[in-house]
């Protein structure tokens, strides 16, 4: 019969990687907690309108990449392409701004974008998303960037490059957009059809286009940093100064516009050289009008998201993602198997990672399985040992063996394993 495979761009996270996910998640909880963040879990499906209004109608995500469906009652719903919009929707819906001036939230889970799959790019991928509401001071920008770099380093990532930029505000960005439109006038024929259209709909998006001729054409365009108003310029220079104070190195990339329209002022990305073309492990920025644009109060915000699969792909191979077992019980004979069955499950109840074999295989093949399971100890016995009331505990690394009396065996094994 023909086998059914996963959908293109959707991938299974196998146990080895799952273990890494779990470890990274626990580091995320620990690090974010110490900066005052609390976890929120939001649905993976939202009303389509939410993403159109936040990410921007003329972004690639909204124009081409969303998984949108008409629900039975003809309401349009979308598998979330990112988490920021959903977290803000929840922030507004639960009126969080009324109980505290500052709200720090994070969420971890799958996102969906119908992009062309390639190394490091999937149609379902996981993000660790962090949002900081209620503060517009540049210290909060530096703090969240510092936390991101600290978190990535704690997971084991090295050779990271932090890029920052300012995308201005509704006062100064239109002047920059105008300058870009003027710059592109006369060069339309060098641009891809999408970018030709973008000149009138969303000229900043041309900076994000991966088509070579578009990238070459935009290379000498004006720099947004030359158009910032005094407030944005001052904010950006203070962010840099606070990053210096926190010993967080960065480079300024004045061409970075990010793929979502909601950013104001600071934008940032973290890149690594270990990923090929999809080299951004994390990205984020400030969004001072987004909460109110989505019907909430005038509350500024800033956040970022880490690409979980990309982070995992960059982790140095350490063997830390090996599964281990505390004890493998190799029992030979029916009496021995019966004792082993109860013992294995009692040990598990006591928190020992224990395994046994039900198949009555030879000692050699049972011990082979113990090695495969990366077991620290093996307990070996047959019916004869049961009669003699003494079993053998073998340290799988040193091969040392010791006799353990059957009486009080459970407690003595737990003691030996826990003291190891
Ligand atoms: P983003 O830059 O679109 O930002 O995504 C953040 C990260 O998600 C990227 O740097 C990348 O590591 C990962 N990522 C994105 N698309 C894919 C994909 N198709 N396959 C694998 N990984 C991917 C946001 O999503 C914003 N919501 C971040 C943010 C939070 N801004 C403010 N708050």
Image (spheres, rainbow, N blue to C red):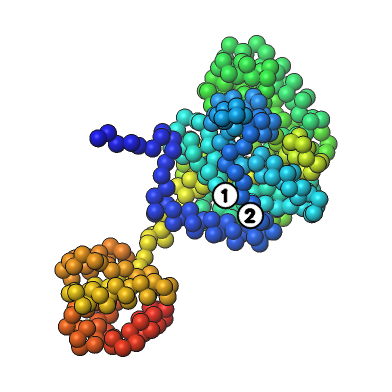
The answer to the question of whether label 2 and label 1 lie on touching residues, with beta carbons closer than 8 A, is yes
Q: Residues within 10 Å of mark 2 (few under 14, many from 20)?
A: some
Secondary structure under the numbered disc 2 in the rendered image: strand
Q: Nearer the viewer, residue 151 or 233?
A: 151
| x, y percent for residue 313 | 45, 47
Relative to 54, 342 lies left or right: left
Q: Quadrant of residue 215?
A: top right
> For disc 1, does the CB lie below 8 Å from ligand 1?
no
The residue positioned 76% from the left and 29% from the top of the image is: 173
Is residue 55 visible in the rendered image? The answer is no
Secondary structure under the numbered disc 1 in the rendered image: strand
Residue labelled with disc 2: 39
Residue labelled with disc 1: 108
Relative to 312, 127 lies left or right: right
Relative to 123, 203 lies left or right: right
Q: Residue furthest front?
A: 73
| x, y percent for residue 37 | 67, 56
The residue positioned 61% from the left and 50% from the top of the image is: 41
The residue positioned 75% from the left and 20% from the top of the image is: 178
Q: Residues within 10 Å of mark 1 (few under 14, many from 20)?
A: many
Relative to 173, 124 lies left or right: left
| x, y percent for residue 143 | 70, 53
| x, y percent for residue 93 | 73, 44
- Quadrant the N terminus occupies: top left
The residue positioned 39% from the left and 54% from the top of the image is: 16
Relative vertical location of residue 386 with respect to residue 171 in this rendering, above or below:
below
Q: CA distance from mark 2 to mark 1?
A: 8 Å
> For disc 2, does the CB lie below 8 Å from ligand 1?
no
Relative vertical location of residue 390 with respect to residue 57 in this rendering, above or below:
below
Q: Nearer the viewer, residue 317 or 25?
A: 25
Which of marks 1 and 2 precedes in the sequence?
2
């Amino acid at each position: 019969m023909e086998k059914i495979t996963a959908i293109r761009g959707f991938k299974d996270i196998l146990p080895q990687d799952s273990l890494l996910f779990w470890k990274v998640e626990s580091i995320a909880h620990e690090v974010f907690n110490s900066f005052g963040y609390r976890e929120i879990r939001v649905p993976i499906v939202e009303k389509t309108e939410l993403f159109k209004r936040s990410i921007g109608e003329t972004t690639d995500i909204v124009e081409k990449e969303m998984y949108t469906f008409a629900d039975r009652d003809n309401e349009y719903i979308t598998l979330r392409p990112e988490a920021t919009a959903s977290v803000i929707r929840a922030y507004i819906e639960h009126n969080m701004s009324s109980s505290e001036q500052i709200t720090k939230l994070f969420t971890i889970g799958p996102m969906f974008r119908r992009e062309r799959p390639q190394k490091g790019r999937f149609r379902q991928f996981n993000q660790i998303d962090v949002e900081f509401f209620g503060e517009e001071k540049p210290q909060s920008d530096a703090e969240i960037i510092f936390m991101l770099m600290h978190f990535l380093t704690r997971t084991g990532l090295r050779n990271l490059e932090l890029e920052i930029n300012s995308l201005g505000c509704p006062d100064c960005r239109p002047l920059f957009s105008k300058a870009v439109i003027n710059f592109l006038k006369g060069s339309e024929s060098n641009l891809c059809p999408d970018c030709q259209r973008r000149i009138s709909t969303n000229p900043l998006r041309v900076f994000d286009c991966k088509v070579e001729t578009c990238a070459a054409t935009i290379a000498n365009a004006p720099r947004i940093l030359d158009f910032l108003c005094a407030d944005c310029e001052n904010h950006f220079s203070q962010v840099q100064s606070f990053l210096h104070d926190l010993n967080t190195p960065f480079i300024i990339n004045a061409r970075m516009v990010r793929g979502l329209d909601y950013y104001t002022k600071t934008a940032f990305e973290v890149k690594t050289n270990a990923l090929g073309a999809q080299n951004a492990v994390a990205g984020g920025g400030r969004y001072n009008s987004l909460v109110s644009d989505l019907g909430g109060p005038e509350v500024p915000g800033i956040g970022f998201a880490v690409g979980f699969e990309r982070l995992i792909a960059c982790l140095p191979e350490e063997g830390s993602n090996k599964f281990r077992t505390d004890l493998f019980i190799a029992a030979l004979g029916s009496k021995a198997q019966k004792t082993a069955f109860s013992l294995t499950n009692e040990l598990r109840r006591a928190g020992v990672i224990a395994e046994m074999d039900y198949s009555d295989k030879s000692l050699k093949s049972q011990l082979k399985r113990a090695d495969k399971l990366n077991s620290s100890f093996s307990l070996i016995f047959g019916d004869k040992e049961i009669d003699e009331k003494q079993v053998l505990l073998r340290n799988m690394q040193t091969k040392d063996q010791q006799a353990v009396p059957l009486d009080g065996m459970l407690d003595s094994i737990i003691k030996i394993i826990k003291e190891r």
